Image (spheres, rainbow, N blue to C red):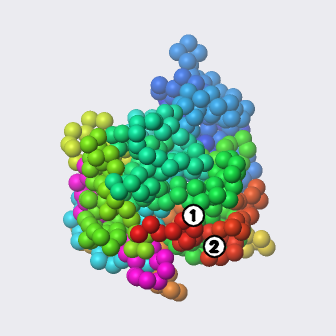
């Protein structure tokens, strides 16, 4: 273990000052900022052969330093202050086949500062034992799975990654790489029908309709990210996006230009529709009008990186939105969500003997989205501190981040998610509230007007979330209530603070709204074909040959207005 204070007085003088607060901008190998000695930043160099880079800045915003630490058996630890980040990332990402490390809003915590695993197991058990609210959200159920698709396009990691430096195997940008980055084998000639345009293919259903994602002769999805076939609703959404790309190819014959149009219209769907529905209204309006207030990880020399707090923390709120049953079309009854998962290759209903999606499982989107006013759509569950029964014992095949050594074939998703946050050293939500508010105060709106602060939950230790949860949160001097795991806090604050009194809409709470809004906004800007320019201004109008509800936006409803609803 090396510390900044052990690397020489000159270095300490350069990067530390009395009362200075340091936040890791690019955290690679950073272990913790010591609470007992605010002049010490610790770096874990175990097993790392290349340079370890950390950019830190002081609270007054005036002093900034990039540390490059090197460790070898003969010379021990050496350091210099040259900003070597771009070289480091280029070297290490090439070894990881193009993937990149996550950004950290706060450094990874030392093990002794994290909640112990028994406490997290007790919290997960309390989440499972409490009766789930019967309240639905104001968000149509289709957006649960649009959020899942967005999560897949922005990030993928696994327990195989170094937990202090988890690798992201996606591009950190919303650029549809989870669809457009074709598998090397392409679409094999196996006698199966495909309808291909613009580099993307649609697969046939059991009735011969091109209404499914492409699959091989064993039913395996031919997608860059096979998670997009982990339930039939998300696979049907991806098939609809591919159909929309085919519609774009009717307008633009050049493949690159067609992909650019598809990306930009889908970015508008996320920015102008999905985020507008889930984000606190004031936060949404502020970022759309004035740009981001705390997430500036795209400043040179740092390429944008998805924060680990977003991917492994607050953006997993969508698990709580999943319903126990769904009406998918006028043929099926209200199907349990287990069947929604089962009708995939992962669920083994689609396999070598039955390599096609059964045609009666093609989604009629008017059941999940208000397309034409002909029926009331199914709504997502309201985000709260409980999950559907299905997730209490989830088959391990749906778990992409199963820790090694886990022997059981099932896992409670609540416990897995809480312990995954611990494994990467996520800071408690209360520390993030303080961090974000400090950043927001330093980046006021024009005219010096302060941005909307994140107001934290005043008391998590009471019984507002149920007796079982209240008991666990109150143990050990209310330790978990005072230093709350980010994912649980996201669910709790949506329940407590997420309802907009102006119209009764259900949204994320203040902290998650800020982190999700600014992360996704930055990820859209990071795309080469972004609708957000370098000044964070939105520059977009739907293509004039497409039908659009609004003149300056494209929404999920418009996808189906342009491709038709197959059912």
Rendered view: 297 above or below 487: above
User: Residue 409: x percent and y percent?
Assistant: 21, 44
Inspect the magenta stretch and tell me whether residue 391 lies in it.
Answer: yes
User: Residue 532: x percent and y percent?
Assistant: 71, 59
Inspect the magenta stretch and tell me whether residue 27 lies in it.
Answer: no
Q: Residue at x 79, y 73 (%)?
A: 447
Q: Is residue 557 visible?
A: yes
User: Residue 402: x percent and y percent?
Assistant: 32, 42
**484 vs 36, nearest the viewer:** 484
User: Residue 329: x percent and y percent?
Assistant: 35, 70
Q: Is residue 9 visible?
A: no
**17 vs 146, nearest the viewer:** 146
Q: Which mark is nearer the camera, 2 or 1?
A: 2
- Report which residue position mark 1 lands on: 270
Q: Residue at x 49, y 33 (%)?
A: 185
For the C terminus, the quadrant is: bottom left
Q: Residue at x 32, y 63 (%)?
A: 360
Q: Which residues are magenta?
A: 369-398
Query: Mark number for residue 179?
Result: none
Rendered view: 305 above or below 445: above
- Report which residue position mark 2 lands on: 548
Residue at the extreme right of the image, as rendered: 447
Residue at the extreme top of the image, as rendered: 74
**485 vs 504, nearest the viewer:** 504
Mark 2, Cα crowd under 10 Å, few <14 / some 14-19 / many 20+, is: some
Rendered view: 306 above or below 124: above
């Amino acid at each position: 273990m090396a510390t900044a204070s052990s690397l020489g007085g000159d270095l300490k003088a350069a990067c530390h000052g009395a009362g200075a607060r340091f936040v890791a901008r690019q955290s690679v190998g950073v272990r913790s900022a010591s609470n007992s000695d605010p002049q010490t930043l610790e770096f874990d160099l175990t097993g790392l052969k290349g340079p370890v880079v950390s950019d830190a800045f002081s609270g007054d915003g005036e002093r900034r330093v990039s540390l490059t630490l090197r460790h070898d058996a003969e010379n021990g630890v050496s350091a210099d202050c040259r900003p070597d980040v771009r070289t480091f990332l280029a070297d290490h990402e090439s070894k990881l086949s193009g993937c990149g490390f996550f950004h950290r809003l706060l450094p990874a915590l030392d093990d002794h500062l994290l909640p112990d695993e028994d406490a997290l197991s007790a919290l997960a058990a309390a989440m499972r034992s409490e009766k789930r609210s019967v309240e639905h959200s104001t968000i149509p159920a289709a957006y649960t799975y649009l959020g899942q698709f967005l999560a897949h396009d922005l990030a993928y990691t696994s327990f195989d990654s170094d937990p202090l430096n988890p690798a992201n195997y996606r591009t950190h940008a919303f650029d549809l790489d989870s669809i457009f980055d074709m598998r090397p084998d392409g679409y094999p000639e196996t006698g199966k029908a495909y309808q291909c345009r613009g580099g993307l293919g649609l697969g046939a259903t059991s009735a011969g309709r091109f209404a499914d994602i492409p699959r091989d002769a064993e039913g395996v999805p031919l997608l860059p990210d096979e998670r997009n076939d982990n339930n039939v609703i998300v696979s049907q959404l991806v098939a609809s996006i591919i159909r929309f790309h085919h519609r774009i190819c009717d307008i633009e014959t050049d493949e690159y230009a067609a992909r650019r149009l598809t990306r930009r219209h889908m970015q508008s769907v996320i920015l102008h529709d999905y985020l507008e529905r889930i984000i606190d209204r004031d936060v949404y309006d502020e970022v759309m009008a004035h740009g981001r207030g705390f997430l500036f990880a795209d400043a040179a020399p740092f390429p944008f990186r998805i924060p680990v707090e977003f991917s492994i923390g607050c953006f997993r709120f969508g698990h709580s939105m999943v319903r126990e049953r769904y009406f998918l079309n006028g043929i099926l009854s209200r199907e349990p969500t287990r069947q929604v998962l089962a009708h995939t290759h992962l669920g083994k209903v689609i396999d070598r003997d039955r390599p096609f999606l059964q045609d009666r499982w093609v989604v009629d989107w008017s059941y999940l989205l208000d397309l034409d006013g002909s029926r009331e759509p199914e709504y997502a569950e309201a985000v709260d501190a409980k999950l559907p029964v299905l997730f209490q014992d989830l088959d391990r095949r749906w778990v992409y981040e199963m820790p090694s050594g886990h022997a059981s074939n099932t896992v409670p998703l609540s416990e897995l998610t809480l312990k995954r946050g611990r494994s990467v050293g996520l800071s408690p939500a209360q520390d993030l509230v303080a961090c974000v508010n400090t950043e927001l105060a330093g980046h006021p709106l024009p005219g010096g007007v302060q941005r909307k602060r994140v107001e934290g939950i005043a008391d998590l230790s009471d019984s507002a979330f149920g007796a079982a949860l209240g008991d666990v949160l109150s143990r050990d001097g209310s330790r978990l209530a005072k230093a709350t795991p980010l994912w649980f806090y996201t669910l709790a604050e949506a329940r407590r603070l997420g309802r907009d009194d102006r119209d009764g809409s259900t949204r994320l709470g203040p902290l998650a709204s800020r982190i999700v809004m600014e992360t996704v906004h930055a990820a859209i800007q990071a795309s080469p074909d972004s609708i957000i320019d370098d000044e964070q201004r939105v520059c977009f109008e739907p293509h004039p040959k497409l039908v659009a509800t609004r003149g300056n936006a494209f929404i999920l409803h418009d996808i189906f207005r342009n491709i038709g609803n197959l059912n």
